[in-house]
Image (cartoon, helix red, strand yellow):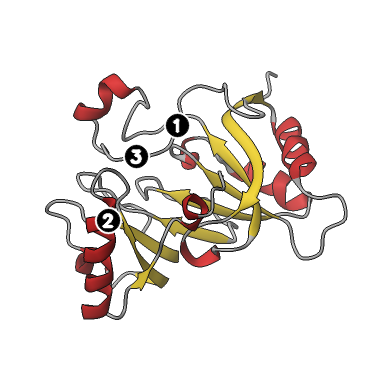
Amino acid sequence: MQLRKYSIKEIYYTIQGEGGQTGRPAVFCRFAGCNLWTGREEDRQKAICQFCDTDFFDTDGENGGKYIARELVSKIQSQWPSNPSGTPLVVCTGGEPLLQLNSALITAIHQAGFEIAIETNGTIRSPENIDWICVSPKAGAELIQITGHELKFVYPQNGFDPEQFIHLNFKHFFLQPMDGPNITENIQSTIQYCLEHPQWRLSLQTHKLVGLK
């Protein structure tokens, strides 16, 4: 029987820069591919999600490649410090990690001693036993994963009101300014929205502010 291979854009050790786990060291495992955009710049204008700021196309990034589960877990482990304190964390991101992340890989990562966080657009239901679920809904895409630890809304999105999500079963609600040419204006409007709607917390991409990947 041929073993499943996971297509990975990159794997690297850094500090989580946004949302509810900001400041926590983590191994980022970026899965290649997404269901809301091909990742090709020429397809951006016809994509459902047009504002993505991440390169998730192909497997040519740092430690990228096609891995079977045990190889992938070994590569994740190799990025973590050899004499750490605290519980190791891997952030499964993309693209859309739930196109590939499955129960078998979740079990293998847990057996290696890691907590697992995911960053997902919420269009695919999450498997069980993920330790931290961050859902970032996108305008024009059906939201399927309606529970989790944090809902992180990239703001503003035309015709997409953050308040439509506030009743959902999440522990934290973050509003994050949309990156791009209007970032200064978007930061100010996000701050103002949070001040007027205090159930939302401000999330900044601090890794960009301090020069981390």
Q: In the rendered view, does 184 fall on the left or right side of 85?
A: left
Query: Between residues 190 and 3, which one lies in front from this camera angle?
Result: 190
Q: Is residue 40 depicted above or below 173 in this figure?
A: above
Q: Amino acid at mark 2?
A: Thr
Amino acid under label 3? Cys
Per the rendering, the mark at residue 55 is 1
| Residue at the spot 27% in from the left edge and 56% down from the top edge | 184
Q: What residue does disc 2 label?
A: 184
Q: Is residue 93 left or right of residue 35?
A: right
Report the disc number at residue 52.
3
Rendered location of residue 12, percent (x, y): 65, 40
Q: Quadrant of the C terminus?
A: top right
Provide residue 107's location: percent of width, then percent of height. 69, 48
Within 10 Å of disc 2 (Cα), the crowding (few <14, some 14-19, many 20+) is few
SS state under label 2: helix
Q: Is residue 147 visible?
A: no
